């Protein structure tokens, strides 16, 4: 890498003891400036590292006086000699040397930065967002974005080597079906007409397969106008892929290899082979379709075991589930109350029963009396816990209760520190239901998107029992986070039409929305399927970051705004007029 320019001979991360005696020219930001007994020390920073520069009164009084003007984040150019340091700093690669300054130039001054530009800062999230360019100077953000770059390059190279073609698709399009709202762009030339920004390149990548490209990828921005939810961005980056003449296994195997290779190459981490877990198993054991399999603590279905004792709550519930709490017998009453309050708040459930087993069984409420000690101990046994542990029991509708137990499982594991750090566990969740029933709007909805193929063996029950039809869809989950999702697509026009019928989309509506695509399906469509990765998520998970905002250079904030640009913002009357748009004040 050649970093030599008209301004510098070396970067701030380059010089070592072997360079002692060399005359060099460095440029960078004055990260720290200390004046100590007639000496000015400047930690000169650039993306490559930090080098200490020294101005000593005894060497050059004038220069020393001038150097006292250097302040934090000034951009300076220094010329001088590399020499061995007296007080070496073993924490940085350049810690053995320093620059004995012979001259320097202030290339640009800096206002006092609004927060400390160091590994740890005193700046709150809002302030840092407003001055994002300064936040990006901090080491963690530099590391994250440089890692992001490496993952991007790795992805490009890996996919290209495997024969995927990087093909681009347009941003100004008509709606794509990923289930969110579209961002729309008004057309000036066609009054009252709008483009939509892609929620994903779904239909284009399928068209590429019809065009015969066989393997496609694109690292592409997608736009979804969703309500604000935890850690979503209205624009985000996908690694979008599609392959022809493949079944589910082909796609999953290919991308298992991709992820395993990325972890190995960038983190030197060997992932275990990815489990394929059916959706129902994930729900029943983990209470979620994105199970965190780094730790045990599995939900157990105890519906049959607790019915018939005359306990109304159990007898009348569709489902009763138990969640073990290892070492739970020593949990304080206060903690139990806190957990119960938490789950009532987040899952809208009436609460839970719990039993602790120290020397004897203890419970809040009458549960031991009603079920008897033997039965309760059997429940412990069935949940693979015993003396010293505790059991949480909840009853109600299946989906609601397993989900609540799943939420509690994660919450408790976090609070009790049961999740191993620095560990990655990846799996594919498979066999999703193709459709789910929308109570409010009274029709079926696709769980993935309407182009996902049903399992062949389930096609006969599409008319009679649509809710039971499984999809050829798969999600990749790492550490409890959905990292990618995809499916085998429908490549047959009449089956596609049938799915639209089930979704309550009339022929006219379907044609109006996706006519071009339905037309295309009739010209020799290969069997095909694909997957799309949330690239920001993958980056964040690999870096152990809690939020994708930490791996995006200029993200929107939690309120979906860009505080630096102050966007979204109104536009001028003229612009509105040109676009034939009138604002109706809310
Ligand atoms: N287009 C889908 C999505 O964005 C992914 C896929 O099916 O390939 O979720």
Image (cartoon, helix red, strand yellow):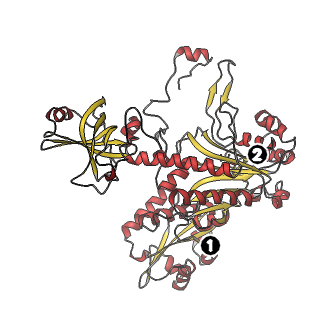
Label 2 sits on a secondary structure element that is loop
Against 119, is 291 above or below?
Answer: below
Q: In this view, does 376 lie to the left or right of 182?
A: left
Mark 2: few/some/many CA within 10 Å (<14, 14-19, 20+): some
Question: In which quarter of the view is residue 33 placed?
Answer: top left
Of badges 1 and 2, the one in the foreground is 2
Q: How far apart are marks 1 and 2 (CA)?
A: 34 Å
Q: Are marks 1 and 2 in contact (CB under 8 Å)?
A: no
Q: In this view, does 397 lie to the left or right of 40?
A: right
Q: Which residue is drawn at 56% across and 42% down?
A: 236
Residue 269: assigned label: none
Label 1 sits on a secondary structure element that is helix
Q: Is residue 496 left or right of residue 182?
A: right
Mark 1: few/some/many CA within 10 Å (<14, 14-19, 20+): some
Q: Can residue 230 be seen in this view?
A: no
Label 1 vs 2, first from the N-terminus: 1
Give the labeled residue for mark 2. 503
Under 8 Å from ligand 1: the CB of mark 1?
no
Question: In which quarter of the view is residue 462 placed?
Answer: bottom right
Q: 81 or 395, which lies in front?
A: 81
Against 528, is 184 above or below?
Answer: above
x and y, in percent, of residue 170 in the image: 68, 33
Q: Which residue is drawn at 61% across and 45% down?
A: 238
Name the residue at the front extreme: 21
Q: Can residue 570 be seen in this view?
A: yes
x and y, in percent, of residue 519 in the image: 84, 37
Give the labeled residue for mark 1. 303
Q: Residue at x 67, y 65 (%)?
A: 276
Q: 196 or 438, which lies in front?
A: 196
Q: 38 or 523, which lies in front?
A: 38
Q: 134 or 97, which lies in front?
A: 97
């Amino acid at each position: 890498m050649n970093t030599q320019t008209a301004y510098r001979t070396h970067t701030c991360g380059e010089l070592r003891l072997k360079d002692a005696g060399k005359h060099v020219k460095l440029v960078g930001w004055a990260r720290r400036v200390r004046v100590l007994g007639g000496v000015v020390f400047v930690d000169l920073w650039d993306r490559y590292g930090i080098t200490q520069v020294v101005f000593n009164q005894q060497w050059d009084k004038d220069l020393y006086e001038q150097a006292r003007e250097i302040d934090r984040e000034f951009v300076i150019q220094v010329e001088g000699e590399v020499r061995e340091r007296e007080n070496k700093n073993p924490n940085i690669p350049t810690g053995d040397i320093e620059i004995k300054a012979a001259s320097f130039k202030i290339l640009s001054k800096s206002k006092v930065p609004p927060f400390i530009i160091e590994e740890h800062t005193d700046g709150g999230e809002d302030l840092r967002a407003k001055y994002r360019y300064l936040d990006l100077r901090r080491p963690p953000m530099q590391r994250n974005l440089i890692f992001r770059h490496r993952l991007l390059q790795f992805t490009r190279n890996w996919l290209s080597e495997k024969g995927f073609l990087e093909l681009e698709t347009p941003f100004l399009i008509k709606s794509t079906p990923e289930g969110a709202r579209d961002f729309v762009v008004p057309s000036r030339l066609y009054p009252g007409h709008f483009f939509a920004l892609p929620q994903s390149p779904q239909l284009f990548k399928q068209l590429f397969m019809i065009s015969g490209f066989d393997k496609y990828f694109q690292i592409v921005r997608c736009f979804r106008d969703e309500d604000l939810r935890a850690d979503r961005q209205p624009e985000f980056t996908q690694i979008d892929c599609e392959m022809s003449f493949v079944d589910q296994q082909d796609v999953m195997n290919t991308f298992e290899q991709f992820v395993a290779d990325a972890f190995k190459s960038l983190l030197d981490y060997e992932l275990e082979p990815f489990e394929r877990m059916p959706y129902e198993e994930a729900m029943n054991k983990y209470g979620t379709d994105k199970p965190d399999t780094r730790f045990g603590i599995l939900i157990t279905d105890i519906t049959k075991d607790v019915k018939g004792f005359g306990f109304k709550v159990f007898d009348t519930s569709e489902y009763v589930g138990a969640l073990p709490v290892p070492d739970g017998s020593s949990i304080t009453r206060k903690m139990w109350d806190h957990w119960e309050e938490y789950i009532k708040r987040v899952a809208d459930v009436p609460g839970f029963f719990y039993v602790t087993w120290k020397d004897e069984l203890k419970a809040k409420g009458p549960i031991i009396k009603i079920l008897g000690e033997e039965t309760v101990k059997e429940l412990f046994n069935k949940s693979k816990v015993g003396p010293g542990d505790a059991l949480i029991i909840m009853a109600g509708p299946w989906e609601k209760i397993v989900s609540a137990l799943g939420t509690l499982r994660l919450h408790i594991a976090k609070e009790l520190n049961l999740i191993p750090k620095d560990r990655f566990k990846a799996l594919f969740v498979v066999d999703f239901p193709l459709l789910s029933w929308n109570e409010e709007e009274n029709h079926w909805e696709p769980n993935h998107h309407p182009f996902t193929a049903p399992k062949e063996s389930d096609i006969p029950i599409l008319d009679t029992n649509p809710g039971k039809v499984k999809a050829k869809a798969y999600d990749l989950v790492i550490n409890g986070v959905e990292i990618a999702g995809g499916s085998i697509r429908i490549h047959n026009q009449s089956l596609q039409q049938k799915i639209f019928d089930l979704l309550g989309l009339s022929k006219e509506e379907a044609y109006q929305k996706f006519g071009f695509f339905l037309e295309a399906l009739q010209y020799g469509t290969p069997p095909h399927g694909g997957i799309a990765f949330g690239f920001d998520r993958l980056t964040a998970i690999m870096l152990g970051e809690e939020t994708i905002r930490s791996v995006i250079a200029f993200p929107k904030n939690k309120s979906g705004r860009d505080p630096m640009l102050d966007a979204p913002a109104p536009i001028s009357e003229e612009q509105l007029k040109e676009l034939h748009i009138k604002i109706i004040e809310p």
